[in-house]
Amino acid sequence: MSPNPWLLFCLLLAAIAAGWWLGRRQGKGRFRNKPLPVSESLSFLLKDQADAAIESFIQSLDVRPATLEIHLALGTLLRRRGEVDRAIRIHQNILERKGLEAAQCAMVQLELGRDYAAAGWLDRAERMFQTVLPAGGPFEEVALQQLLEVYDCSHEWEKAIATGERWLSLQRVGQFQGREKLATAMSHYFCELAAIEQSAGRIAAMQPHLEQASRFAPGSLRVCRLQVQMALGLGDTGKALKVFRKHVLEYPASLPELLDVAERVFRSRAAWMDCLQEGLSRGFSVRVLNALAQALIAEGRQEEALALVTEQVRRYPGLQGVRALLGLHLPLASGQAQEHLQVLSVLLERLIQNRPVYHCSECGFHGQYLHWQCPGCKAWGSVNRIQGIEGD
Ligand SMILES: [Zn+2]
């Protein structure tokens, strides 16, 4: 195995610190005629034998209050560098030693749980974090946070909800900065349960989950989508329309994300077009513009559609708008003009192709689709449409 320079450097520092501490503590008598145990680690390090160095380090340096920080720091470092097996070895080694205080034990168990989670052993991580819960205080909060991540990762939504509820019950209002993020996550957990019922065809069973989801995140776009779909699934078009109208009135920017479900709630094309027209008047969106143009064309009003798109693209220039305009002009052109427009269309498609449509406000992830949970940072509800000249 090739030596890891950072690991070697950190082990070297740890070994020197431990050697200094032991030397000071033990005095001149006890180790006068034999090398300090940590010198073995140093020797292995100098020979680029990282595995042997770590093993020697573990064996040579007793876990005591004064050395606990060194062990923990090394374990954390190893985990962050992806060397999870070694981190586990170090944290297990600490736990095997007798005489740890309850708080120290909880601290090490949390680290070991993190190691397991990093290794993908979520069941072991879950058990380890659960053992920390009785410790109470800040340890309980951290353990709950870690458990929530485990359940989130393993898609165990009901357990995640129970853990989130318990975590929220520990917080004093105003002292928890992530409270809003947790509430958003909780709303999505209930939406996930509703989506499972929807997939299984148990449409009415979506209702209680959506009520809970709405309680945690009033005005949630996802809740609105699911509520509209549920009402349509139950054949209650009136309720679907009411839910949709209420949401869009309050959050007009969400209309583009509801177009696919919204069209079905309107009984007439005229009413649908009125809705789109109103949506455009409250905020520009190429998707809404396209939907309105297509509705006009379906009514045989091509020229009106062309005039509308031309006027809107002049007011709100952008690549997507130009593409929409080109798409309308192309079938109307003929001869050489059509050929030129065709070339332009191909070039524009290449320019737009693979350009991200959504981005995450938390980590900067860019993608083509709306993800309820960011694939990059796993935050819920942080992915939004890109707007402006390259966006919608
Ligand atoms: Zn992200």
Image: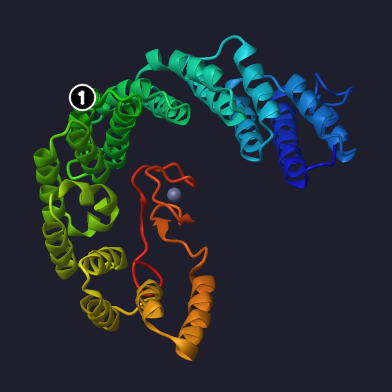
Residue drawn 30% across the image and 63% down it: 287
Color theme of the render: rainbow
Residue 264 position (above or below residue 182): below
**Image quarter in which the C terminus is found:** bottom left
- The answer to which of 18 and 194 lies nearer the viewer is 194
- The answer to which of 271 and 140 lies nearer the viewer is 271
**Image quarter in which the N terminus is found:** top right
* Residue 101 x/y as whole percent: 50, 15
Residue 233 position (above or below residue 346): above
* Residue 57 x/y as whole percent: 76, 26
Q: Secondary structure at mark 1?
A: helix
Residue drawn 16% across the image and 33% down it: 235
Residue drawn 10% across the image and 39% down it: 239
- The answer to which of 309 and 182 lies nearer the viewer is 309
Mark 1 surroundings: few (<14), some (14-19) or many (≥20) residues within 10 A: some
* Residue 386 x/y as whole percent: 37, 63
Does the rendering let one see residue 158? yes
Outermost residue toward the bottom in this view: 336
Whether the residue carrying mark 1 lies under 8 Å from ligand 1 is answered with no
Quadrant for residue 75, please give it.
top right
Residue 147 falls left or right of residue 268: right
- The answer to which of 81 and 246 lies nearer the viewer is 246
Amino acid marked by disc 1: Ala
Outermost residue toward the top in this view: 98
Does the rendering let one see residue 173? no
Residue 75 falls left or right of residue 58: left
* Residue 132 x/y as whole percent: 44, 17
Residue drawn 40% across the image and 52% down it: 362
Residue 31 position (above or below residue 310): above
Residue under label 1, please give it.
Answer: 204
Count of numbered tags: 1
